[in-house]
Amino acid sequence: MADQIARGEELEKKAEKKLNGWGLFSSKYEDAADLFDKAANSFKLAKSWDQAGSAYVKLANCYIKSDSKHEAASAYADAAHCYKKTNTKVCPTRVWCVSVSDMFRTLEIAELCEAEQNFEQAIDYYERAADLFDSEEVTTSANQCKQKIAQFAAQLEQYQKSIEIYEFIAQKSLNNNLLKYGVKGHLLNAGICQLCKGKGDVVAISNALERYQDMDPTFSGTREYRLLADLADAIDQEDVAKFTDAVKEFDSMTQLDAWKTTLLLRVKEALKAKELEEDDLT
């Protein structure tokens, strides 16, 4: 047993040296992962469960760095099994490993549903993943999951759900120096969903813009605010050309992604239909 522990410790040292040395980003994490895996197996043979669990956590970190979520989840699960065999003092660590393993597995399923464009299922699994990340106070990852939920909800025309999520993230980001720069983007997304939901209800859109200014007084000075205000004016005037020009002007400075373009096209088509309907009446 002592020989296996010594071998495991030596393999860990080699892995740490790989991580701290020079080399291609992906290559050094793959090489270190292989060494940590072997170290964990040596510790398991020696029934040194604490050391084995620790090695598996380090292995999981390597997989995370190389964006191998499935392997990371498996490594955390292995760590949990090792910690389960040791004393009660490390039970919180075991519970944490189980939780993290669940996070990655749930996120993996959500991404698979997304790739298959099964948006209703993707929303369900991203919601589960967001709850798991929130429970561990991993705010950034939780917000990324919530943004996915909002994105797919809007694609399914569940605009109110999207609005609430984007507004919630914007509000929470205001007091975070690292996140507050993204507030204008979240409010723009919420505003576009308001345009889709309102279907020409200019009062509702105007009220939303007032709320966003109250939430973030700097928002009114941004191009994102100006775009929403211009689009609201175009809808109020039932002017398709003005709507198109406002979108083109913004896009010339900040390229609109496919999601925003799709939603804005829905608003434009509704505006065109209303314009044609009134032309027919006259």
Image: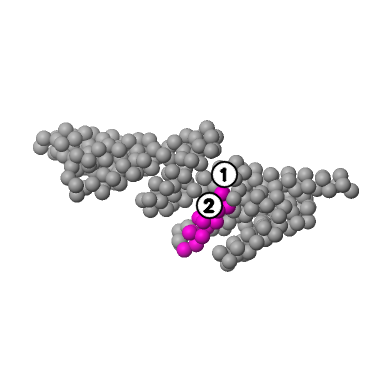
What residue is rendered at 45% in x and 61% in y? Answer: 176
With respect to residue 210, does 115 lie above or below? above
Residue 91 visible to an observer of this rendering: yes
Find residue 194 and report its horizontal and vertical position in percent: 64, 53
Cα–Cα span, label 2 and label 1: 10 Å
- Residue 168 among magenta residues: yes
Q: Quadrant for residue 108, please give it.
A: top left
Residue closer to the observer: 19 or 268: 268
Residue beneath the point at 14% across and 35% down: 46
* Among the 4 quarters of the image, the one containing residue 40: top left
Give the magenta-colored segment's residue range.
161-175
Residue shown at 49%/35% (left/top)? 113
Q: Earlier in the sequence, mark 2 or mark 1?
A: 1
Asked which secondary structure carries label 2, the reply is helix
**Looking at numbered disc 1 in the image, what kind of residue is underneath it?**
Ala
On residue 186, which mark appears? none
One can see residue 257 in this view = no
Q: Name the residue under label 1.
A: 153
Instruction: Tell me the residue at 14%/38% (across/down).
Output: 5
Say if mark 2 contacts mark 1, CB within 8 Å.
yes
Kindly give the residue lying farthest to the right in the view shown. 282
Q: In this view, does 15 lie to the left or right of 201?
A: left
Residue labelled with disc 2: 165
